[in-house]
Amino acid sequence: MNNKKIGTLIIIVCSVLWAISGICGQLLFSRTSLSTPFLTMVRLAVSGLILSGMAFFSNPQKFLSLFKNKKDMLNAFIFSVFGCMAVQYSYFAAIEASNAATGTILQYMSPIFVVVTMSALHKKLPNIAEGLCCILAVAGVFLVSTGGNIKYLSISPEALFWGIFSAGCLAYYNIAPVSLVKKYGTMEIVGLGMLLGSVMLGVLVRPFGVPMEGVDFVAIAEIVVIIIFGTIIPFAAYPKGVAIIGSTKSSIIATSEPMSAFLISLFILGEKYPPLSIVGFFFIVLAVIFITLSGKKENNDRK
């Protein structure tokens, strides 16, 4: 197997693992008394501790140098709260209010937020392709949330809010730490961000002493899957896949995450979706693919 096939396989596996993580979250919320704050804090704390440990033991000097730079440490803390903590919390909140497929597909609107943010920062309108992608994505959200019937929502207002909020947080997550990641590395910044995010969530929400109704061996196994297979492995492996096949191809292949979540929800969990909501899912995925290709073309035009 050549390098490109290995890189493609890494991205696909990471995307499917993230989808399975969302499915496990949905199952936990439906069968146990565990809540979004508790599950998010546990995921961030354990994953952050392990990723930070891996980063430290692989290069202690580089990891510790972050703590000596007050400006970088402040930026890392801001990223931990508005990036790591906010993304994970809003994602699970969307799933708890709806299901894994809906939460994941709404979060995948993040490239639209990136386009809008970058256009605002550079004080220029999106190009025609980006504008059409934004319209396609908005149409997709409309169909997902209404099923094509404007008189009612097919998902709860809470799910719609958290899903769109999660997309905005994910856009920030992808934009904010670029300089820090270049300087210190992905595992170092993400690991520390998760660890600090878990501490802040514990301080802000205090999700302690939660009832453990329904928490059995299966539930514990699902939490382990979320932490190990849905967080640590894909967060450590995904950058390696990107390094092999490039960010554009990786972003397109990564759309297998919402599609995997949708297919698992539909065929294994037996979730029911209005036909036009399914069309909306595909609209959002297509918008992400087209906007990624548009960004690649724009970069090539500048060269």
Image (cartoon, rainbow, N blue to C red):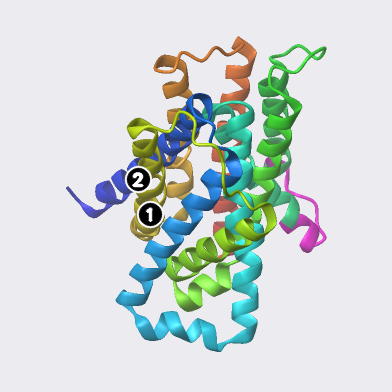
- The residue singled out by tag 1 in the image is 232
Q: Is residue 67 left or right of residue 253?
A: right
Q: Is residue 161 left or right of residue 3?
A: right
Q: Is residue 284 left or right of residue 194?
A: right
Name the kind of residue labelled 1 in the image. Answer: Ile
User: Callout 1 environment at 10 Å: few (<14), some (14 to 19), or many (20+)?
Assistant: many
> Dividing the picture into quarters, in which one does residue 253 lie?
top left
Query: x and y percent of residue 20 in the render?
Result: 40, 35
Query: x and y percent of residue 274 in the render?
Result: 62, 11
**Residue 30: mark in rendering:** none
Magenta run includes residue 123? yes
Q: Is residue 268 above or below residue 12?
A: above
Query: x and y percent of residue 151 in the render?
Result: 82, 12
Q: What span is colored magenta in the figure?
A: 118-129
Q: Nearer the viewer, residue 135 or 175?
A: 175
- The residue singled out by tag 2 in the image is 229
Q: Is residue 131 above or below residue 300?
A: above
Q: Is residue 283 left or right of residue 270?
A: right
Look at 59% across and 72% down and name the residue there. Answer: 76
- Residue farthest along the left direction in this orientation: 1
Q: Nearer the viewer, residue 123 or 165?
A: 165
Q: CA distance from mark 1 to mark 2?
A: 6 Å
Query: Which element type, helix, strand or loop, lies under badge 2?
Result: helix
Q: Quadrant of the C terminus?
A: bottom right
Query: Which element type, helix, strand or loop, lies under badge 1?
Result: helix
Look at 52% across and 44% down and name the residue there. Answer: 39
> Is residue 294 in view from this perspective?
no
1 and 2 marks in contact (CB < 8 Å):
yes
Magenta run includes residue 221? no
Look at 62% across and 85% down and name the residue there. Answer: 70
